[in-house]
Amino acid sequence: MSDSGRLWPLVGRAAELDDLEQLLTEATEGGGAAVLLEGEAGVGRTSLVAALASGAGLLGIEVRTDRGALEGGRAADEQGGARVPARLVVLEDVHLWGAADLEALADVARDGMRPGALVVLTLRPVPHRPEVAAVVTAWTRAGARHLEVRPLPGAAATELAEEILGASIGPALRGAVSTAGGNPQLVVDVVTTARDVGALQAAEGGVDAVVPGWRGAVERRVRERLDYVDDEVLDLLGVASVLGVSFVVLDLAAVADRPVADVWRTLRHALAAGLVHARGDRLVFRHDVVRAALYGGLDAGARAGLHARAAAALREAGAPLAVVATHVERSR
Ligand SMILES: Nc1ncnc2c1ncn2[C@@H]1O[C@H](COP(=O)(O)OP(=O)(O)O)[C@@H](O)[C@H]1O
Ligand SMILES: [Mg+2]
């Protein structure tokens, strides 16, 4: 692991990095290009652009990461007709920028692409802000590509865990890693928490998490990671966590005692954040560990009350008796 705590090379990102490097070559040898690099929190946008930037550095391509990098517009680049140097401009976490900077960033898109430059903007789709949407619209009209950074496949997530620990991992830890839903940040959180609280022991040619009771520490860590999500969304997902990893939206509305349309309005943000995904009228938590963290964060009284409401709603909806009984039991 490097000093920054980042792992090199990146696990499971060869294809994404190839695409970006190809785009960098085309852009810097020609009329320029731009990419909007999107994805859920912790999915690895910063890691990917850092890898791209280090590759660019090796090729002698100037790397700029300051907000002033595009100042002066395209006219400044073409001043005097001199050939512009190849550049990679990386502007990170645009969704967090202030309104004035965002307006400027939307404005420079109207000049079109910069010859010799690849502009990479990284962003997260939530919380929704109109100024951010305006930037995305302006750059899309200018011809920017969208690149969605997806969660790591299961095998890559395991590989990442094993890289961090420098050992192969046993079934219990493997199971815990799979609750991260392929989100590298959550994989790092699960594995480093297990290590730091002393839950790991040598097992069959590797290590495993055999000391019980460490999941609570992981859940606390994950709740901190959810800080960026609006309270209203977190509250509703907390209610949903009582219903399980997948739940029917009608049932959630009943337990939350809110109109279905209202619940959908809030869930839109959870969907955009990549915290849940939709399967027809069901929603599924994308990361089991997030559901567990939200459930663990409910206070005992509220949790019991929600289980009682869930029991009533599910009984009414004709759910199997055993399911209803589980909720009744947990409501005590
Ligand atoms: N492909 C990867 N291989 C190894 N570690 C990764 C990978 N992607 C992300 N990470 C690690 O996961 C954490 C979050 O990644 P980061 O790039 O900061 O995510 P984002 O910028 O999308 O929020 C960091 O600790 C990073 O080192
Ligand atoms: Mg980042």
Image: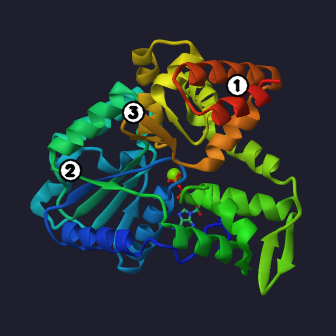
The location of residue 145, given as percent across then percent down, is: 23, 54
- Residue farthest to the left? 81
- Quickly name the residue at label 1: 307
Q: Which of marks 2 and 3 is nearer the N terminus?
A: 2
Above or below residue 89? Residue 313 is: above
Q: In this view, does 281 lie to the left or right of 142?
A: right
Element class at badge 1: helix
Q: Residue at x 72, y 34 (%)?
A: 326
Label 3 Cα neighbours within 10 Å, binned few <14 / some 14-19 / many ≥20: few
Please state which amino acid type lies under the numbered disc 3.
Asp
Q: Are marks 1 and 3 in contact (CB under 8 Å)?
A: no
Mark 1 or mark 2, earlier in chain: 2
Question: Assess mark 2: CB under 8 A from ligand 2?
Answer: no
Quarter of the figure with the C terminus = top right
Question: Label 2 sits on what residue type?
Answer: Ala
Crowdedness of circle 1 by 10 Å Cα count: few (<14), some, many (20+)?
Answer: many
Label 1, label 2: how far apart the Cα atoms are? 63 Å
Residue corresponding to mark 2: 76
Towards the viewer: 15 or 182? 182
Mark 1 is on which residue type? His
Question: Where is mark 3, residue-wise?
Answer: 281
Outermost residue toward the front in this view:
321
Q: What element carries label 2?
A: helix
Q: Could you say where residue 5 lies in the image, as x and y percent from the top left?
A: 66, 66
Q: Which of 96 and 213 is in front in this view?
A: 213
Q: How far apart are marks 1 and 3 (CA)?
A: 21 Å
